[in-house]
Amino acid sequence: MFEKSLYDLIRGLRNHKGNEKEYIQNCLKECRSEIRSPDMDLKATALLKLIYLEMNGHDMSWASFHVLEVMSSQKYHQKRVGYLGAVQSFRPDTDVLMMATNLLKKDLASSHPTTITLPIVALPHLVTPSLALSLLGDLLPRLTHSHASIKKKTVVTLYRLALVYPEALRAAWPKIKERLMDKDEDPSVTAAIVNVVCELGWRRPQDFLPLAPRLFELLVDGGNNWMAIKLIKLFATLTPLEPRLVRKLLPPLTNLVKTTPAMSLLYECINGIIQGGILGDGEDFSAREEVASLCVSKLRGMVSINSDPNLKYVALLAFNRIVTTHPMLVAEQEDVILECIDSEDISIRIKALDLVQGMVSSDNLLSIVSRLMRQLKASSSALAQQQDGQEDLDDSSEDGSGRRAKSQEQTAPLPDDYTIDVIGRILGMCSQNNYANVIDFDWYIDVLTQLVRIAPPPSPRDLDSDSSSSPKSVDISERIGNELRNVAVKVKAVRPAAVRAAELIISRLSTDTVSSRPVVTGALKPLAFVVGEYAFQLSSPDDTLRNMLGLMPRVDYPEVLATCLQSIPKLFAHVAGDDRALWTPERKSSLSLLMARVIHILEPFAQHPYLEVQERAVEFIELLRLTAEAASGQAPSTDEIQQDAPLLLTQAIPSLFTGWELNSVAPGAQYNVPIPSGLDLDEPIHPNLGSLLSQADSLMLPTQGDDEFEVYYNQRPAPTSIYSGPAIEKLVDAPEEVGSSYQQAGEESYLDADIVARRKAERRERNKDDPFYIPDMSSSRTGTSTPIHNILQKENGPDLDIDAIPIMSLDLEKLSVSGPSRHQQSQHPRQARQKIVIEADETLGGSGGNSGVSTPGGAARPGYDSENNSDSFNLSKAAKKPKQKSLLQFNSSVLGGLSLTDEQRPDDGFAHERQQKEEAEMALAMKEVQRLRLEMQRANERIQVAQGVPSEGVAVVKKKKKKTKTVVKADEGEEGVLKKKKKKVEGGGGEGVVTKKKKKKAARVVKLDEGDGPDGEGMGGE
């Protein structure tokens, strides 16, 4: 009696805060009873409330039949509620959806435009293949309706039908094309058709190439920005098929770029120019360059002038596409692009990094890397200050508040993922094309040294896992070390500097970390290889060996341990293998102690579960034990007798590591190695391999270190990064930025103080004899220079008379005539920069030369691709990116094989089978429709029988197989006709003719008048 409306339900739900669940359950019970009511208004209100509750997560699939009842209402406001409920609750597997076919047909054929729009709008949400087939014939006439809104919605609905039933597009395309070619058509209908054509064009652009003249006319004279955007996207797919469109499209697109105030249309014009190949193809080079300059200037304005982050993002996307064809034009916008690197939006930062990685060259590499390094250095300093602030939390409140205020003003630390990404891009830019962009390798080595210090710690890994059998997690510090190793191997001119850098990093690792904490940096593995392989170029081999021995017990990763175990004998051989040194008692005792220490360090690794570590440790321990016995048995030299060192020490051990020099090998060269004919990789290497592996798993290393309680409370934790700045920076505020010199772009802003001081000392020593170099007066001993007179007196003695030097007379007239030629002859060409030879990766035959990388298929990959190239780093991230799904949750790839013309229809071997399968599915669908219709008819009959058949009603008699006669009972005095083929029957008061029927019909009795008797006859009249 007092039912709730939708507004009452919403108000009640808001009034029952905290008790919503119980209130909703009561409302659902009321809706269940109300929706069964015969009152259609009450039923529609209950359905509207159910729709609201369904939007809040409650199921209403049980009310699907009631939804169908409301849809069949004759009142528009009730019918609209029913269609809304169908959109919300119906699914392709809903049972009553087949019963709605006739209702949809009826509403599509309605004479009221508002009623026609209801099924057209609802069909995209309800459509199934069988429903699309049934309603296609009713939808096509709506394309010629007098109302533009109906035609517009019909076009969009037909595209949705084509996604589930592609043949619908073939039947509808002639009428859609007719509407498109009609110049008097409503603009909204034309815009809808352009949207559909754009969605179909990228699947099969060749079908829409004949429409290019009409589409070009719409682009020029349309006046609709959104339709122009769709047309530009469509032309971008058509220009590869018809290159002549480029010259036709260039003037209108250029005009739109210059004149349009809409940023969306401006970006789409630029994007269409890029994707359509206008910048990369064409005969008119000057026109292409002019268009490229115009696009770049507009994009620069979108980045620098507008503060909208969305515009910046799409502008960077366009820059990333232009940089492939016009890198020099994009490189000129370096200032605004580098400003985006410091943006607060992380997505803008990533796109800016992609762009600078694509536009890098030998001219701008230094400035780009310097900018990125300053960002990383500021983040590292902020992180170090945060850690120091955590340690000083117990200080006074005034000091704490002041420090917090200072820390808030400074740069916030960057996330580790972003820091790793930036470091990976720096390594990729520098190592691109076999270090083609690096001019100063000394600077690059210093950058790598600084990156090792600011790199975040690696993520924890399973120490027992084999990296060769499972994908290895990204350790950016190991990639940095690999770059330093590559420079040392490939660039022989700077190999001493690379070795000294590796020596310095190992020394800092040994001294700056707590002795009880494990070494987690992955850079130790390549650095150990460098100091071991090129030990003869170390400045202090003894200290390096001592540092390596100190780091060995703290290394947890077995791969790093195996490399360190290989480098320690190399260092020992270089330190102790000098055959020219005398075998003195001091040397004998020092080497004996050194061998004892090395054996003591290596002994625990003889039982390591990692087989490679165990094997190398056992070999070197036994070798050193033999050498120690030989050294103890060799008497030292005296004043009378000169004794040589043991041959094991001076010749045998060094000969193990001398010979051919190791060079860089291409990653794909292993695929070209032929497999030996007698090699069986499936055969076990040992008959009892399983038992040996089980025993190896049970072996564990002895625990080292103190008690965990003692370590936790009495020892400082290991720092996450190596900070080498002066201590004064922790007490007072350092200057924000130091003036940069003209030699390098502000090295002090991103390199540590010790690296900057060493670089200045090396530069001063290198340029001390250069007359064109102005030294730093602050570093010189005296602030005055030596007069030229004192130099002459010192070099020539006191007898030199400067006034006695003869002076030649010059004829200026002759000089003016012959001056230019002499001046040209006196000019010397500028001294070229010293060329540094960079060795390429070695590979086997069939890989296409040293510039490519061989693949398993035998094809060569162009360009340089070392193991540290960032391409693999970026590809691994791209591979993890999930594939995006369509918003409609339907795959539109089925339209790719559909041709809109019969001539282009694909004729493959499976066409007949596919057609048979479709016909079988359609037959099943039709049987299901007939079954449901028969059930509805029988249910209606049962209802009528239960209520009683009225006298005016029609009784349906079961159809008989035999020939039937039609008997018509007329009023008295009327003539009746009884016809039968070729027979005449006379009876009663007239004659009747009985004619044979072609089709059998059930006997039907029609009562024309209640007063007629059962025996009445009808007489035929003429």
Image: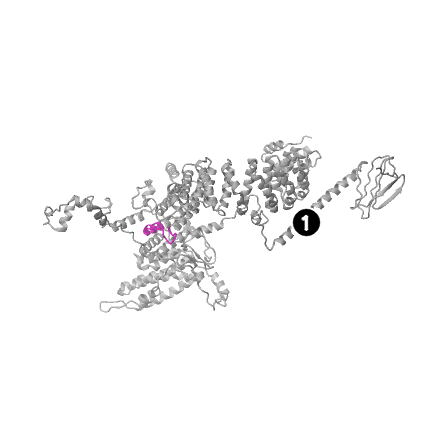
Q: Quadrant of the N terminus?
A: top right
Is 439 in the magenta? yes
Is residue 558 visible in the rendered image? The answer is no
Give the residue at mark 1: 923
The residue lying at 90 percent from left, 38 percent from top is: 989
Residue 288 picture quarter: top left
Viewer-side residue, 328 vs 197: 197
Specify the segment rendered in magenta: 430-449
**Would you say 201 lies left or right of 24 here?**
left
Closest to the observer, 725 or 777: 777
> In the image, what residue type sits under mark 1?
Ala
Query: Which quadrant of the view contains residue 537?
Result: bottom left
Q: Residue furthest right?
A: 988
**Residue 124: x, y in percent?**
60, 41
Is 238 in the magenta? no
* Quarter containing the C terminus: top right
73 horizontally vs 560: left or right? right
In-front residue for pair 934/560: 934
Q: Residues within 10 Å of mark 1 (few under 14, many from 20)?
A: few
Q: Secondary structure at mark 1?
A: helix
Q: Position of residue 388 (x, y in %)?
A: 38, 43
Q: Which quadrant holds residue 397? A: top left
